Image (cartoon, grey):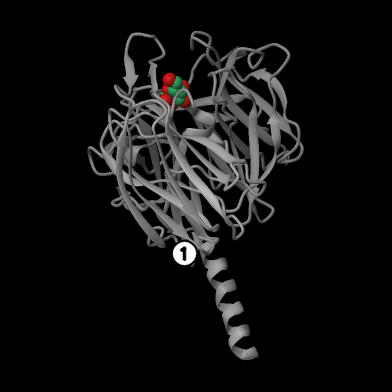
Amino acid sequence: MVRIILLWIMSSLLCLAANAQVIHNGIPWFDEQGNIINAHGACIVEDGGRYWLFGEYKSDESNAFPGFGCYSSADLVNWRFERIVLPVQKDGILGPDRVGERVKVMKCPKTGEYVMLMHADDLGYNDPYIGIATSPTINGDYTLHGPILFDGKPLRHWDMGTFQDTDGKGYLLIHHGPIYRLSDDYRSIEAKVAHVEGMGESPAMFKKNGLYYLLTSNLTSWERNDNYYFTASSIEGPWKKQGYFCPEGTLTWNSQSTFVLPLRRDNDTIPMYMGDRWSYPHQASAATYVWLPMKAEGEKLAIPEYWDAWNAAKAEKKLSIQGREQVHNWISDKKGDCLEREFDGGRIAVVGKTDGNGGYATISISYANGKVLDKLFVDFYSKIPDEGLRFVSKNYPKGKYRLRIEVTGTQSAWYNKKKTIRYGSHGYLVNVTKTIEMEADV
Ligand code: GLA
């Protein structure tokens, strides 16, 4: 009997350990304190045996810069919120009512300092700068020094990314083409080394087997589009335009590139694509992340399949959520309509359809007595139709709980930077196909 219990405990622990490694794309993630992980336009730095995730700590109400946040993790799945490493400043390029985006951090090999670069702007995107901040520790208070300078002048650009080469040199990647090499202390710009004709926004770069890959999106604001890439055997170029890295029409599996993290696995390096699935105006809770391993073989770069669940340790596809299913096929766009289901603790998952007429739902979990434990927005909008996981709750102890999905009668819709094109949803539909109840951790 004791042996059986021990075996059971061991297999549950193994199962927990295995499951704790799963990345679920396109749904809100929770940190170790149970708060939503809020790190958009992000990057990851591997340092001191941990992964450090930096991102825009968005709000649900406005696009004004609310600070850059930092999280850390040993496995890319379980994240601890470290702190807001760069808060709203009293004034200057990241003062009140400014925009702060695409934060990128690198450790400067020469000085040992952590250097943060970002896009700073006004709310109308008419006053762009590339800003620089530094900190002696990775998760410390970053000191903002203002705009980074080239030939004594600030760079007036918006979307940016960074790349650190194997020789320790740091690069700043700019929308629509320019690539700049940073000085040895990473605090200023030494030279413009390339101009990649045909580039778009959201640049991200990695190198594998001596070949450089540069990812970029088209100019469609927060709307998704088919992102594409370039290759070169030297960072100075010539850069060759290669085409899409996700199947055409999937709109980069419904995401926009922000960074590529080289995953060191089994003597191989697998580039991990990091993308944003934006959701304006509720970016803090309803915008999600798409992280997927990429296949890079010579000039061919691809994410051939969308995995809604994958094992970060092995970079392998996992079967999506399994458990007790209830089919609902429930569709409504009437504000206040709701779908409810009871469950006995563990996790509850929501599977649903999104399309061009989708709107926001609120999803809440409460005790049987009505006390609400968690409540957040979930977006049922996507430009191209999709069916998949929309939400997986935290793991609750055994008990009586109620899941409630309510139609808000609001939608994700916004304008481009010049305020000339309207993007987003044309309806308020919430479309839930099924819910799945899981006893154990996933
Ligand atoms: C694009 C950029 C983002 C942000 C939005 C705002 O998606 O890549 O960083 O500036 O536009 O419209």
Residue 53 location, x and y as percent?
Answer: 60, 42
Determine whether, in the image, residue 208 is placed left or right of residue 429: right
Residue 188's quadrant in the figure? top right
Residue 176 location, x and y as percent?
Answer: 38, 23
Determine whether, in the image, residue 335 is placed left or right of residue 373: left
Nearer to the camera, 109 or 125: 125
Q: Vertical placement of 249 versus 319: above or below?
A: above
Quadrant into which the N terminus falls: bottom right
Residue 184 seen in the figure: no
Q: For mark 1, what is the residue?
A: 314
Residue 288 location, x and y as percent?
Answer: 46, 38
Residue at horizontal 43%, vertical 34%? 406
Amino acid type, mark 1: Lys
Q: Quadrant of ligand 1?
A: top left
Nearer to the camera, 128 or 226: 226
Q: Vertical placement of 283 versus 423: above or below?
A: below
Residue 137 seen in the figure: yes
Determine whether the residue tagged by mark 1 lies in a helix, strand or loop.
loop
Q: Vertical placement of 106 versus 401: above or below?
A: above
Q: Vertical placement of 357 versus 106: above or below?
A: above
Nearer to the camera, 379 or 277: 379
Residue at horizontal 48%, vertical 19%? 158
Q: Furthest residue to the front?
A: 369
Determine whether, in the image, residue 66 is placed left or right of residue 143: left
Residue 403 location, x and y as percent?
Answer: 48, 45
